[in-house]
């Protein structure tokens, strides 16, 4: 007589160790991170190219030499930032005699590279500052002149200034949160 009781069958089954490699999981996570980085860079490229197009339009329309210099500096800084971001996206070449990385090592390396790139974000964006300062300095004079005749200009500009202030405060907070999350993941991996 055969016993079909599920509990008995479960208790009588042979115990055997199951060997599962985590390498495919970590390779998948590294590839997902790489894909995410590519989308981020593609979005950044679009934003910078749209910005450069807008700066070119303004350059053609303005006759003020100071503004033109500032716009040219901003466009040049934007091109340099795009170049730096692309350079950060692609990993440096691996020596031909180096052994292949495991999935865990590749994922850890990608996380560490992303963390380093995020820590150096201000250095990456620094080429935009000279142009932004020159354009802002030339624009502030015009705004002050216009505001002296029509105070409503200051009231109309207030929402922009508030949003800019909120963005400048929120950006470091969000970056710190992301860096902390990546650091926790690196610690969980045993780095």
Image (cartoon, rainbow, N blue to C red):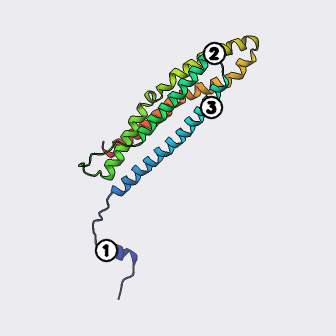
Residue positioned most to the bottom = 1
What residue did someone put label 1 on? 13
Does the residue at mark 2 contact the one at mark 1 (Cβ under 8 Å)?
no
Question: Residue drawn 45% across and 37% down?
Answer: 85
The residue where tag 2 is placed is 140
Circle nearer the viewer, 2 or 3: 3
Element class at badge 2: helix
Rate crowding at label 2 as few (under 14), some (14 to 19) or many (20 or more) other CA atoms within 10 Å: few
Q: Is residue 188 visible?
A: no
Give the CA distance from mark 1 to mark 3: 71 Å
The tag earlier along the polypeptide, 2 or 3, is 3
N-term mark: 2 or 1: 1
What is the quadrant of residue 2 in the picture? bottom left
* Residue 190 visible in the snapshot: yes
Q: Nearer the viewer, residue 10 or 35?
A: 35
Please give left or right for residue 58 compared with residue 117 in the image: right
**Of residues 64 and 27, which is closer to you in this image?**
64
Q: Is residue 108 above or below residue 147?
A: below
- On the image, the x and y values in percent for residue 26 come to 36, 52
* Dots 2, 3 in contact, CB < 8 A: no
Residue 57 locus on image (x, y percent): 64, 30
CA separation, marks 2 and 3?
Answer: 20 Å
Q: Pick the residue in front: 125 or 113.
A: 125
Q: Residue at x 39, y 49 (%)?
A: 30
The image shows residue 51 at horizontal and vertical percentages of 59, 33
Q: Quadrant of residue 90?
A: top left
Can you identify the residue that label 3 sits on? 54
| Local SS, label 3 | helix
């Amino acid at each position: 007589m055969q016993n079909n009781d599920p509990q008995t069958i479960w208790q009588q089954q042979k115990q055997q160790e199951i060997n599962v490699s985590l390498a495919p999981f970590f390779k998948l996570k590294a590839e997902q991170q790489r894909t995410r980085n590519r989308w981020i860079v593609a979005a950044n490229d679009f934003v910078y190219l749209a910005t450069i197009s807008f700066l070119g339009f303004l350059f053609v329309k303005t006759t003020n030499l100071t503004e033109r210099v500032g716009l040219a500096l901003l466009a040049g800084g934007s091109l340099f930032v795009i170049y730096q971001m692309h350079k950060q996206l692609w990993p440096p070449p691996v020596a031909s005699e180096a052994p292949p990385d495991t999935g865990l090592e590749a994922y850890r390396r990608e996380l560490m590279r992303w963390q380093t790139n995020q820590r150096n974000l201000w250095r990456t964006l620094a080429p935009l500052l000279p142009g932004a300062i020159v354009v802002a300095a030339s624009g502030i004079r015009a705004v002050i002149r216009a505001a002296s005749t029509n105070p409503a200009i200051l009231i109309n500009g207030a929402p922009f200034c508030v949003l800019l202030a909120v963005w400048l405060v929120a950006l470091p907070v969000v970056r710190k949160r992301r860096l902390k999350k990546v650091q926790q993941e690196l610690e969980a991996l045993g780095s």
